[in-house]
Amino acid sequence: MYTQGLDAKTEQGAQPSPRLVTEQDAALQGRFQERVDAEEKIEPRDWMPEGYRRTLVRQISQHAHSEIVGMLPEGNWITRAPTLRRKVALLAKVQDEGGHGLYLYSAAETLGVSRDELVGQLLSGKAKYSSIFNYPTPTWADIGAIGWLVDGAAIMNQVPLCRCSYGPYARAMVRICREESFHQRQGYELMLALAQGTPEQKRMAQDALNRWWWPSLMMFGPSDDQSAHSAQNMAWKIKRFSNDELRQRFVDATVPQAEFLGLTIPDPELRFNAETGHYEFGAIDWTEFNEILKGNGPCNRERIEARRKAWDDGAWVREAATAHAAKRKQRALKKAG
Amino acid sequence: MSTDLKEALFGYTLRLGDTSLVLGHRLSEWCGHAPELEEDIALTNVALDLVGHARMLLTYAGELEGKGRDEDRLAYRRDVFDYRNHLLVEQPNRDFGHTIVRQFLHDAWAVELYERLCASTDTTLAGIAAKAVKEVRYHVRHSGDWLVRLGDGTDVSHAKVADALGRLWPYTGEMFERDEAEQALVAAGIVPDPADLKAAWTARVEAVLEDATLDRPADGWMQKGGRRGEHSEHLGYLLAEMQFLPRAYPDATW
């Protein structure tokens, strides 16, 4: 799940280096921008500005990492799903996320980086992933809330990416969005079963909404005036809508869904403005968001440790597979020779 | 179908369903933690298939029993001594090599079984087998390929799977046990003869072990009890985890 929160501040990678702007570059840049403006897709072998390439590598790989790390909070409930139908649905969902990670790493590889390198950046803590996955999933209702809210927010961000100027990313997103919207409906249906269930189940659902609401709003990233790369990414058509526009869209779509569930959004300032036709909501606590980005979220350490453990524990397996492939090749050569 | 035969078929179907469920559960514990992304997806696929088989089998078992128990009632509201799975599949994952050995020993049995069950005189069971066999054919190829890679990989991987094979071999005898009830099912053409299964399983396992440069362990003492509800200590923890929500909220529907 991609979050625009990731393209905020700190990293300078997206700025084209001034020394590159020679006359020839300017001509290439001009042609590139014309193609983007004409809604042509940029493909891996096409010329592209270095900043464009770097921005995409960063964004696509962060998106891939988010899918992989995102398997953990939901995977936490696979062995405890309360019915076999729910167990199968959750397994399939988490598996889809692994699949999304795969296509996204492949899309990033078209830009000249290897998956091993990108995974290395995740494990070393250099690369970011969506902060939302640093929150815990203590109850079963969290599985519903993640599907409904987190996937719901991800869809708002991702649907416009299906029209991203970079072809491989746009095509990967088409497939991902289809699956995400299925997950979102599944999550909502799970919440509905809880909301219509026993008082204890309803309490579980409300508790999950209380914990996931604000983090879901933060998934859209800082306000437009705080977002570092917005203007350039818009011009490159990597980004189509501002963080605030998408956040508003999400709130407008989600509030009536919460009402239908009979649950209360944890925001006393939330109200519908009949004039604008939009919901107005309270101020977001960006201190919490920034602390999580710094590594101080409730599960930052556990998530990365789990990924590192899987990688380290699997080292002998990967080595064995490589050794076996080499032996087979050797034997085939011997046979042929 | 006579009442005795029906009861025998209930026991048989329950055993298959429990075995699929417990193994699917064990594999699902890997989701998000496998040695590489492709393998994470593959193990989850197998887990999904197995839980899918369990659902069909437990649903059918509930119908045969005729006491109104559905798949979830059977999966979530029985204690250890009412579970009928093979002891092999409840053994914990330990490492990836152990998981692969356990899976291969099971898959080699399951593929031979389902191939034969497709011809069962019981049309429901034959229908379930026809669906399952396509998936199980893939499972045995997947686990067999990995066993060869690990056995014929590095010294480390060879030692790990050789150790797992030694640990798990004593649990394989149970798959071919037969009792009076099963005898009657064999006679009625509903299920295959365990002796045939054992011969086919042995041939399959020996071929893969040879490719994997692994020695076949000797058939010594075999651990038994799963089909009578006598399990290892591991199953209780697995069920405690799996059954937590329905046990904690007995009136809830999910």
Image (spheres, coloured by chain):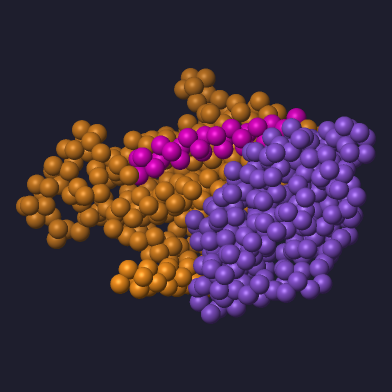
Chain colours: A orange, B purple
Residue A302 placed where, x, y %? 60, 63
Task: Give A266 or A164, whichever is nearer the viewer.
Answer: A164
Is residue A181 inside the magenta stretch?
yes
Q: Nearer the viewer, residue A11 or A304?
A: A304
Percent across and percent down for residue B96 are 60, 66
Q: Can residue A266 be seen in this view?
A: no
How many numbered dots are placed on residues in this image?
A: 0
A325, A199: nearer the viewer: A325
Left or right: A263 as drawn, with respect to A321: right
Report the residue at 63% width, 44% height from top.
B133
- Residue name at image x 32 percent, y 51 percent: A56
Left or right, residue A189 beside residue A331: right
Q: Can residue A102 be seen in this view?
A: yes
Image vertical order of residue B22 relative to residue A82, above or below: below
Q: What segment carries the magenta color?
A: A169-196
Residue lying farthest to the top in this orientation: A275
For the C terminus of chain A, give its image quadrant: bottom left
Determine the main secondary structure of the stretch shown in magenta: helix
Which residue is at a point 75% across and 40% down the rendered structure image? B57
Which residue occupies the extreme bottom position in the image?
Answer: B155
Expressed as whole percent of the image width and height from the top left, the position of residue B12 reads 82, 46
